[in-house]
Structures are given as C-alpha cells and as structure tokens.
Image (spheres, helix red, strand yellow):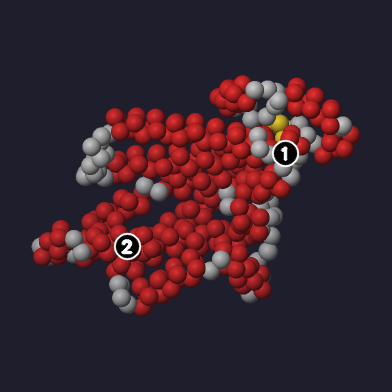
C-alpha cells in the first residue's frame, strides 16, 4: 500500500505540474488589460501600458515568466486582484468566499449521502416494485432535465407554496434552504443510482446465496454484507466530493446570489480579472486531483482485499 501511495502521489504531483503550466500558457493568451483596474486603463496610453507590463515582468521571456510563476505558487503568492477588488491579495478574496461555499457544500453533501444511500438501499431491497420504479423515475428526471429548469421549479414551489426566501441572505438560515435543496438533488440521484447498482450486483453473488442457505437473517445479510461491500466503490468518490464542495456550485451560487467560490469565478471571468481566474482554476484542478488520490487510498483502507500493485491486479 505504501509503495502504491507513493506512486500515486508522484503521479498527482506531475499532473498538478502539467495543469499549472497549461493554466500559465492559457492566461498569457488573455488580454493584458486584465492586469489593470478599469479606471487606470482610461488614463493610460498604450506606451504606459507596455511600460507597466514590462515592470510586472509580463513581457519577459516566456520561460523566465513560467519559472517565476512556479516560484510564486510555491510561496502561495497568487498576486493582486485588479478588477474585483483593486490591489487586494487574491488569497484574501478567496479566503472570504471559501467558508460560504464550504458550509453549503458540506451540508448538501451530508444530505446527499444519507438520502441517496437510503434511497438506493430501498430500491435494491424492493427491486422491480413501486419504490424501485419511483426512485428510477426521480433519477431519470433529475439527470435529464436541465439544472436551471429544476432550480426554477424548486424556487417557484419554495417561494409560492412554502413562503421561503428566493435569495440567500447572510445570517438568515431560512434563506439557505432552497440553495441546499438545489445542490443536493443531483447528488442524491447519483448516490441512489450507484448504491442500487452495486447492491443488486452483490445480491446476485454466490456468498450471499450461501448466507441465505445458512439461514442468516435478511437484515444481517443486507447491512453486514451487501451494503458494506457495495459501499466500497462509493467510498472512492467521497474525498473528491468533499474537497470539491470548497469550489462551490457555479449555477446554484449564481442563481441564489450566494457570495461563494462559484460566483467569484464567474465574476472574475466576466471582468477579466486574470489573477483571480488563474488562482480559481488552479484551486479547482488541484482539489480534483487530491480528491482522486485520497479516494484511491480510502478504498484500499476500507477494503483490505484490494491490492493495487505494479502488475495492475486488483483484489
């Protein structure tokens, strides 16, 4: 396990290195005006803009800029915002948005796991019956209908029938209900779908038939054998799901006016704030890579039967 963990860690570091390089190259294709505040641009001539770009090192040799960029990342120096908050450190801006997205993400993740797994278990137990069909209809509906349509239906029902606030307001927990529901619906369907699939696969295996032949109670078979083994592949995605909650939800945060990471990225792109866009993209990418790495390790910890060695064998 240690050998595999080190190997996966090195692979993850190489991937992060490649992503950092690609982000650097893509940002250099964006207009240089993203490095200046709007009021500054109105007062500056093209010659003054070039002079400032030269002072920033943005006209240096690309390789020199790239290695300087690596050094800045290693020291957590992500530069200053020039559009969203003039001359304010990007780390400070992200630090103010991070807790909001994290709070919404963690709550919706907990709700999604609990309800999704319970729905999937119920579908597997009642395969082919009404509850299974109802769960399937829900999953198909959530996955086939565009998210904005689903959010509109939730908003209409929540505001007109339940009288809930339509927009999020800091400090008002009631106003967070509709955004959390909107964030959770898709994940609930996903966890339910995969829980049902893995449980049905487990129910058809020989060791379950043997357990039934031995007379083990149905509840024991379902909880100690079927659900436990079916949860192993699901566990692989939990770290990534948790870490990506930090990134927030682009659509939900925009739809309900939540001042989180998702809305920050959209605003930065619209205003062409290069340093903020660059940092957000790096953050999303690194969180995804770390999540995949931790998922592999967690899966091996939960199920000792899994062996991932250099020969590529499993179990």
Name the residue rendered at 46%, 40% in the picture: 289
* Residue 195 in which image quadrant: bottom left
Disc count in the image?
A: 2
Considering the image in quadrants, where does the N terminus appear? Answer: top left
Q: Residue furthest right?
A: 43
Secondary structure at numbered mark 2: helix
- Up-down: is 8 above or below 180? above
CA–CA distance in space, label 2 to label 1: 48 Å
Name the residue beneath numbered marker 2. Answer: 197
Query: Percent from the top left, x then y, of residue 79?
Result: 68, 29
The correct choice, above or below, for 63 with respect to 20 in the image is above
Looking at the figure, which quarter contains the C terminus? top left
Does residue 245 appear in this view?
Answer: yes
**Residue 162 seen by the camera:** no
* Image location of residue 138, percent across then percent down: 45, 71
Upstream in sequence: badge 2 or badge 1: 1
Viewer-nearest residue: 296 or 246 = 296
* Residue found at the far bottom of this picture: 130
Q: Farthest left residue?
A: 214
Q: Residue at x 48, y 42 (%)?
A: 288
Q: Secondary structure at mark 1?
A: loop
**Residue at the disc numbered 1:** 31
Q: Report which quarter residue 297 is drawn in.
A: top left
On the rendered structure, is 30 left or right of 314? right
Marks 2/1 in contact by CB < 8 Å: the verdict is: no
Q: Is residue 149 left or right of residue 272?
A: left
Identify which residue is drawn at 56% across, 38% down. Answer: 283
């Amino acid at each position: 396990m240690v050998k595999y963990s080190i190997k996966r860690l090195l692979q993850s570091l190489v991937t992060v290195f490649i992503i950092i390089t690609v982000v650097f190259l893509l940002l250099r294709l964006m207009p240089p005006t993203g490095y200046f505040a709007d009021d500054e641009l109105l007062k500056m001539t093209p010659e003054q803009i070039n002079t400032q770009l030269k002072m920033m090192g943005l006209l240096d040799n690309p390789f020199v800029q790239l290695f300087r960029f690596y050094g800045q990342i290693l020291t957590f120096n992500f530069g200053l915002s020039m559009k969203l908050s003039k001359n304010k450190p990007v780390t400070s801006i992200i630090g103010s948005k991070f807790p909001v997205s994290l709070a919404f993400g963690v709550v919706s993740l907990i709700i999604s796991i609990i309800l999704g797994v319970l729905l999937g278990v119920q579908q597997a137990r009642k395969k082919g019956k009404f509850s299974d069909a109802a769960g399937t209809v829900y999953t198909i509906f959530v996955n086939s209908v565009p998210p904005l349509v689903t959010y509109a239906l939730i908003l209409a029902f929540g505001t007109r029938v339940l009288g809930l606030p339509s927009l999020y307001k800091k400090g008002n927990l009631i106003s967070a209900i509709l955004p959390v529901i909107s964030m959770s619906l898709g994940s609930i369907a996903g966890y339910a779908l995969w829980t049902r699939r893995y449980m049905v696969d487990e129910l058809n295996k020989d060791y379950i038939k043997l357990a039934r032949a031995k007379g083990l109670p149905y509840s024991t078979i379902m909880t100690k054998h079927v659900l436990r083994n079916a949860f192993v592949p699901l566990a692989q995605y939990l770290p990534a799901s948790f870490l990506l909650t930090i990134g927030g939800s682009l659509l939900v945060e925009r739809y309900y006016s939540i001042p989180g990471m998702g809305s920050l990225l959209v605003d930065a792109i619209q205003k062409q704030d290069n340093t903020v866009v660059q940092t957000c993209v790096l953050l999303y990418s690194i969180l995804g890579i770390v999540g995949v790495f931790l998922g592999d390790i967690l899966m091996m910890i939960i199920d000792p039967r899994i062996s991932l060695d250099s020969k590529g064998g499993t179990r």
